[in-house]
Image (spheres, rainbow, N blue to C red):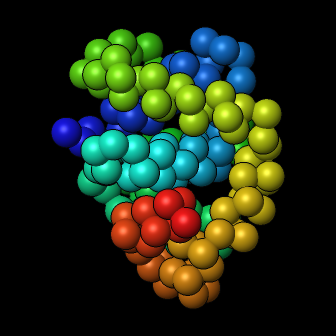
Amino acid sequence: MSYKVLDVCKYVINYSNQKDYGISNLKLQKILYFVQAYFLISEPSRCCFEEKIEAWDFGPVVPKAYREYKQFGSSDIPDTGDNINIISDEDQKLIRTVIEKFADYSATDLVSLTHNQSPWIDAYIPCMNREITPEAIREYFNG
């Protein structure tokens, strides 16, 4: 089962705030990309969310999520106040694993990291916002 990306966002934001990690929209976009990657290489392989990831200038972006939180600019996004209990316990654990892995990375560090990975490199053409496909992500991270 996959989730709505905005539900995944709320979970990521709330967990990050609980742990005092802070999360900007730019960092959120990269965390979503890595969450999708972890789901795609887990058993069984599946998407965490169905919304497209696109190759933008500053790395992978889920447009729907970006638009939802762009009002915060480069500031940290505050807790959403929503209790997201539709995500299974097992999936929450996987999402937390990703957040913990990248908690100490700045948004800029994550941009640099994703700019050196073939899913973004192969999809990116300036101003085109081309899709980074689940297949490209799976292939790279299974590599």
Task: Please report the residue visible at 48 percent of the width from the left and 77 percent of the height from the top.
Answer: 129
Counting labels gives 0
**In the displayed structure image, the side of residue 26 where residue 96 appears, left or right:** left
- The x and y percentages for residue 35 are 48, 43
Q: Is residue 98 left or right of residue 11?
A: right
Res 140 visible: yes
Along the viewing direction, whichever of 105 and 71 lies nearer the viewer: 105
| Residue 33 image offset from top left, x and y in percent | 51, 53
Q: Is residue 84 above or below residue 108?
A: above
Position of 83 with respect to 139 (left or right) is: left
Which residue reaches farthest left?
A: 1
Q: Is residue 137 above or below residue 30?
A: below
Would you place residue 121 above or below residue 111 in this image? Answer: below
Q: Is residue 139 above or below residue 64?
A: below
Q: Quadrant of the C terminus?
A: bottom right
Q: Position of residue 57 (x, y in %)?
A: 65, 72
Which residue is at the front of the view, 108 or 42? 42
Regarding residue 61, the answer to whether it shows in the image is: no
Quadrant in which residue 5 is drawn: top left
**Residue at (36, 38) in percent of width and height:** 6
**Image quadrant assignment for residue 63:** bottom left
Q: Residue at x 61, y 12 (%)?
A: 18
Between residue 140 and residue 110, name the one nearer to us: 140
In the rendering, at what x and y percent does residue 130 appear?
A: 45, 79
- Image position of 107 (left or right of 39): right
Q: Residue at x 31, y 56 (%)?
A: 51
Q: Which quarter shows the N terminus?
A: top left
